Amino acid sequence: MHLSQHFVLVTIHSLIKYKMKKSNTPRKSDRSKKSEQPIGIRLNRFVANAGICSRRDADELISAGKIKVNGEVVTEMGIKVMPGDSVVYKGKRINSERKVYILMNKPKDVVTTTSDPEGRTTVMEIIKNACKERVFPVGRLDRTTTGVLLITNDGDMTKKLTHPSHKQKKIYQVSLNRPLTKSDMLKISEGFELEDGFVAADVISYIDDDKSEIGVEIHSGRNRIVRRMFEHLDYDIRKLDRVYFAGLTKKNVPRGKWRFLTDKEVAFLKIQLGKNKE
């Protein structure tokens, strides 16, 4: 059993090249008609762009009468928001923000929340000066788990990356307290029942000679699933590091540091997500 993607950093291949084609100069009448058309953005997209939720969830908020435009409750899906319009959700005016995508190599002993009642350091404190937009972690890594974490205000992308139906690929490096036996490796590969259902690794392999360093590939989005698989077989995890998430790696990002995704990385990620059906 070999982990084919085993710490092989993803190369962003050349994406679709768009070519601008010259078109005939429009007739004066065509230009005047076009200028008369109002410029706006659909309300569900506006709400999603504000980082409130995904576009699909925005439809539900609108139909439930929870969104106001210019002081009026709006339940019509196709309405467009024009420049200067006031859009209110839960009593607060929201704004359509630019999309921000931050890749962090999460350090140990940092919690993946926007705030912590116990006063522990959060991932948001690490990026507190990164941008003015309100961003949120995509999913959650345990306090002691390190590695790849995406932080964004893109509600649509967050929904696709975290919803179980999309089954995003994740690769972890697991450091155990003792060597993993071949029989236990086979059990993890073939799968077994936990209290919340069947679980199995998609790919699993040894990393070092003493067999206590393991590479695991999974697509499950269930909570603490990697830890629970090994704990079920009486192994203690000394370190758990996510090295790959939905096409993203921590290449050139030291532990505890972060960077913005490039435009090519964002485009590549959206293309990959677009292959999955909503």
Image (tube, rainbow, N blue to C red):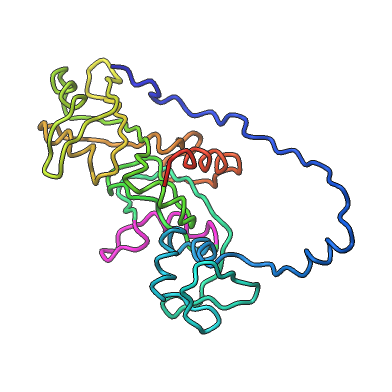
Residue 91's image quarter?
bottom left
- In front: 131, or 194? 194
Q: Is residue 118 shown above or below 245?
A: below
- In front: 45, or 144? 45
Q: Is residue 273 left or right of 27 when viewed as pictured?
A: left
Residue 90 is situated, as x and y percent measured from the top left of the image, at 41, 77
Residue 236 is situated, as x and y percent measured from the top left of the image, at 16, 34
Residue at 19 percent across and 25 percent down: it is 190
Q: Which residues are magenta?
A: 113-131
Q: Is residue 166 left or right of 220 when viewed as pictured?
A: right
Q: Is residue 150 left or right of 2 when viewed as pictured?
A: right
Residue 57's image quarter?
bottom left
Which quadrant would the N terminus be assigned to in this image?
top left
Residue at 42 percent across and 43 percent down: it is 277
Q: Is residue 125 shown above or below 232?
A: below
Residue at 46 percent across and 50 percent down: it is 157
Can residue 125 be found in the magenta stretch?
yes
Q: Main SS type for the magenta part?
A: loop
Can residue 60 be found in the magenta stretch?
no
Q: Is residue 210 shown above or below 68?
A: above
Residue 138 is situated, as x and y percent measured from the top left of the image, at 40, 51
